[in-house]
Amino acid sequence: MKLKTILLSGVFALLSVTCIWGQSKINIGVRGGLTIPNLTAVGKTTELNKDYATSTRFGAAIFAEFKLSSLFSIQPMLEFSEQGAKKSGFQALPTPDELAPIFGLMGQQSPTYLYANFKSNAKLNYLMLPVLAKFGWNFSQSSPFRVYVDAGPFVGLLVSAKQVISGGDSPVYLDSNGTATIPAFDPSTGTPVINPVTGEPVPLTMPFNSTENIKDQLYHVNFGLEGNVGLQYQINRNIIFIEGGGNYGLLNIQKGTANGKNNSGAGTVMIGYAYAL
């Protein structure tokens, strides 16, 4: 949690210094809404790190906007962002170690991957500190409406990471086309289980219902870019706004490369409130 303490200290230190100098007007606020994350395969691609799909999750932030002029401001934020991605349907999985004896009975080595029909959901939660350069324009000199764009770098701390597998029992296959089944073996005889009706070997099935903590498999610190486009409305000192944008991590999140490399990122749709001090 050392990095979290550093991030919090940085935000409050910047706020305190700016207040003492009195060189800018300050807005403080909160925002929250939807994140639409995904994992992008980069560099080395394997059966495991490709074909992820987006999902809908949650994000929220507190921020301070330091207005240096009518056009330009600096906005640091402390942001919580739910990221990750999901897969659903026929896909690859690493061959479990417990299946090694079965492949021994079949007279072959365990393959790197097997294939089955299940759902896989990578849930990654980050605490992020973006520092954004923000440009804004009022519709007119007296208009309460203002449009703005902002962009800048962020540092992210991985708070938690889980891989949620679901789908019940499913046959497992040796090939990505779902044609080569693996026979179930009778552990007492070491021979394939035969369907008495068809006379064919009974296919091996596996349960797909588990939650695994994968935080130790991932780097805990990320660095990337964030940007937004928004519309705000100001009534006296009260500001309400809606904005859309996104963030993208520039670093590979996996510690190992055997299962490929991915970068994390998310689109965002946020609403918020700010108060002009």
Image (cartoon, rainbow, N blue to C red):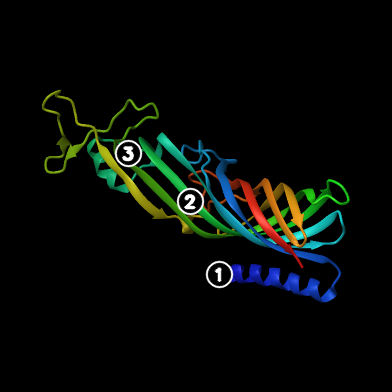
The vertical placement of 77 against 187, above or below, is below
Amino acid on which the number 1 mark rests in the picture? Met
Q: In the rendered structure, find residue 123 and report the number of the disc placed on it.
A: 2
Question: Which residue is painted at 55% across and 43% down in the image?
Answer: 38
Q: Earlier in the sequence, mark 3 or mark 2?
A: 3
Q: Which residue is mark 1?
A: 1
Instruction: Give the x, y percent position of residue 176.
Output: 40, 29
| Observer-nearest of 153 and 227 | 227
Disc 2, SS? strand
Q: In the rendered structure, find residue 198 and report the number of the disc placed on it.
A: none
- How many numbered badges does the structure rendering display? 3
Disc 1, SS? loop
* 64 on left or right of 205: right
Q: In the rendered structure, find residue 109 and report the number of the disc placed on it.
A: 3
Residue 112 in view, yes or no: no
Question: Which residue is painted at 65% across and 49% down in the image?
Answer: 247
| Quadrant hosting residue 29 | bottom right
The vertical placement of 199 against 59, above or below, is above
The vertical placement of 247 against 200, above or below, is below
